[in-house]
Amino acid sequence: MRARLAILLALMLVAHAPAFAVQPDEMLVDPQLEARARALSRELRCMVCQNESIDDSEAPLARDLRLLVRERIKAGDSDRQVLDFLVGRYGEFVLLKPRFEPHTALLWLAPLLALLAGGAAVAVAWRRRPAAAGTDRLSPDEEARLAQLAGREDL
Amino acid sequence: MIAEVGHFALVLALSLALMQAVVPLVGARRGDATLMGVADVTALVQFGFVALSFAALAACYVASDFSVLGVYENSHSTMPLIYKFTSVWGNHEGSMLLWVLILGLFGALVAAFARNVPPTLKATVLAVQAWIAAAFDLFILTTSNPFQRLWPAPFEGRDLNPVLQDMGLAVHPPMLYLGYVGFSIAFSFAVAALIEGRIDAAWARFVRPWVLAAWMCLTLGIAMGSYWAYYELGWGGWWFWDPVENASLMPWLAGTALLHSAVVMEKREALKVWTILLAIVAFSFSLIGTFLVRSGVLTSIHAFATDPARGVFILCILVLFIGGALALYAWRAPMLRQGGLFAPVSREGALVLNNLFLTAACATVFTGTLYPLALEALTGAKISVGPPFFNATFGPLFLPLLIAVPFGPLLAWKRADLAGVAQRLTGAFVVALLGIAATLAIEGRPALPALGVGLALFVMAGAATDIAERTMLLRAPFVTVMRRARGLPRSVWGTAFAHFGLGLTLLGIIGETQWGTERIVAMRPQQTVSLRRYDFTFDGVAPRTGPNYRDLVAHFTVHRNGETIGVMEPAKRTFPSRGTTTTEAALMTRGLSQLYLSLGDPGADGSLAVRIYHKPMVLLIWLGAVVMVIGGGLSLSDRRLRVGAPRPARARAAAQPAE
């Protein structure tokens, strides 16, 4: 059984299976530090993948970054220091949540701006409504037609 | 030969679309019934030709005709028949043909079934529909011909991307497209209304069933895609805020807003101008989604720049239709008459609030998806906008919406009494508080997830309250309640179901994200690992052969409290034709929760890396979506939509025997 397993596993390696996200051998022994590493990994982008965090990615680069994050955590870095270190090395592209800076201000304010613009539009429409009130009344033509219809009803 | 027939059928469809784009419009201008009637015929025949074209392509795929380039690149002779068929739309060219097929289907449905619509409106709608069809037919014929021949014909195909060889993916794109393209009807109706310069409550009644149907398909399509990613990608995530997913979420948000504003327009003749805009916006997001996914702009701006033919073409379609429609809107909308008045606290007011937050959420997703592209194009700076950003912005925008959901249906039209409604929701508040208390008692702090559970329960109980109030549940004898329940309009049931489903999905999301647990371990045979009172024993691995792949299956026995409750067999699947390997996760359903096992790499010491997840209440995420769709279906079957506008008295007399 054991020998067969080894053979099958070897076969699998030959078939070039993709490595999968976080490997058991990467993980830190201290569960608290590991939890921090996992949380940080979810905020970091695997730069060679399409929109995947290094926590999810199977790429070798993601593995390197995961190890790097854990190395920095073991060295006693705070979360902020780990992120600073990675940004310093790879640029802000590595962050899945961009920092609030002049060139990302519009991005971060977009939800608020959308809400305010929508609210303003509603307010303007509200202010204008007395003008629209007249349309609720019938025009003379319609009054006449109504009277005619009502008259017919009486017959 | 078959491929050429398909190609030619598409050319014929294009020429018919061009005719349909012009003639009915002239007819509508002149009031010429014959010219307007042309649209009905061309819409049906055009659909027939696109269907013929699609059938020809499908025949090439099913017969593994590798002299067709697309078949060679995306199929393999040993593939199961069902995947040979579904690989028709597993690639760019074929999926665009599916897009126009569905567009043609909707056009034909309008031609055949929209009998109550005034003839000029109908003719104009079908003409607008034909503009879209012509643009996309032309796109396929000039840049993405699925019938491209290859000479000499290769002996064997290159196989479909293995992750696409799955039932989930077989059904997901057609559903999504039914939703995307379904909004084209609302768009055509909006543009037609602007051209005619006339709009009333009847318009909303004509459009609503189409919007509902499209929304249902889109909801189901998104849910299916999410479930597919969940079990196929092997790490148990179900939503990634990927640009491709966002591309489908944006039309959904706009469509949901449209669904709600159309109610106001139909019932109260208010929000007309806004509803027209939303109808344009919803389909615009469908077009933007198609552009994002199909142009390659997402992969990188550079990929787009090096092979721009397709991207530029779709971009032109985009600019033409969105820009054109918005320009028409800016010109004509001020001429439309505004209708019904209402106080801020009223059903209408609640629906305005709904629209405000849904569109703001939609704008957020739009900005987050396109900001990195725009920034790179303008300044060269590369940033990433990923899940942490969307979670931080989308969540807070949805929160007030969710709190407001139970109030909406209970508020009266025109002017409502908020305190009275809050009082009627006492039961729902109590249910929510009990839920919070129970969650805190069982799971302990932090309090935030417990509040989330409370909110989900509030949404669900609120939906039930509406039905309970209307049927006089617990206040009247059972017989009366049953009679009233049967007498309720189906759309009331639809609202309740859809809102209840929303609560279910929310509950599932909270359960999975807050209490999901995971273990990543290297396991040797006969070793046991436990997670949340479940014990997993790794029995060993064995090979297994499929039709066009080889599996390496790991066998696990699962125990709970010493009792065997089943086996799980995750696998690594290798496709020799492409030399690629996929992870086939094993799932075991326990009530609404799931156990999830997926395999990683073997270690040097003969161990196997294994990821084990316990995902509490995870099934609710998709079950909630299904309940929402059922709600949509109930609304769709509502009598006033089935019957529509009044019919001639004679027809009605025949349809209704003496009561």
Image (spheres, coloured by chain):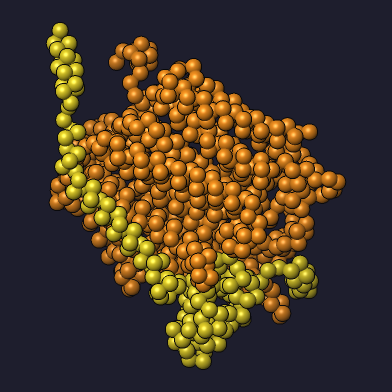
Q: Position of residue B60 (x, y in %)?
A: 74, 39
* Residue B642 higher or lower than B307, as above or below: above
Q: Position of residue A133 (x, y in %)?
A: 17, 38
* Residue B45 higher or lower than B228, as above or below: above
Instruction: Please give left or right for residue A46 compared with residue B494 in the image.
Output: right
- Residue farthest toward the bottom in the current orientation of the protein: A75
Pick the residue in front: B150 or B636.
Answer: B150
* Residue B449 higher or lower than B43, as above or below: below
Pick the residue in front: B211 or B329.
Answer: B329
Q: Which quarter of the image is occupied by the C terminus of chain A?
A: top left
Q: Which quarter of the image is occupied by the N terminus of chain A?
A: bottom right
Q: Residue at x 63, y 76 (%)?
A: A61
Q: Residue at x 36, y 53 (%)?
A: B359
Instruction: Answer whether residue B448 is visible to the viewer in this image.
Output: yes
In the rendered structure, the colour chosen for chain B is: orange
* Residue B495 higher or lower than B370, as above or below: above
Instruction: Please give left or right for residue B549 compared with residue B537 in the image.
Output: right
Q: Position of residue B82 (x, y in %)?
A: 68, 43
In the rendered structure, the colour chosen for chain A is: yellow
Pick the residue in front: B309 or B419.
Answer: B309
Q: Residue at x 33, y 31 (%)?
A: B198
Instruction: Please give left or right for residue B393 compared with residue B339 in the image.
Output: right
Q: Position of residue B11 (x, y in %)?
A: 66, 33
Query: Exactly how many numbered labels are in the figure?
Result: 0
Q: Residue at x 57, y 36 (%)?
A: B134
Pick the residue in front: B536 or B375.
Answer: B375
- Residue farthest toward the top in the current orientation of the protein: A155
Instruction: Answer whether residue B522 is visible to the viewer in this image.
Output: no
Instruction: Please give left or right for residue B405 compared with residue B582 in the image.
Output: left
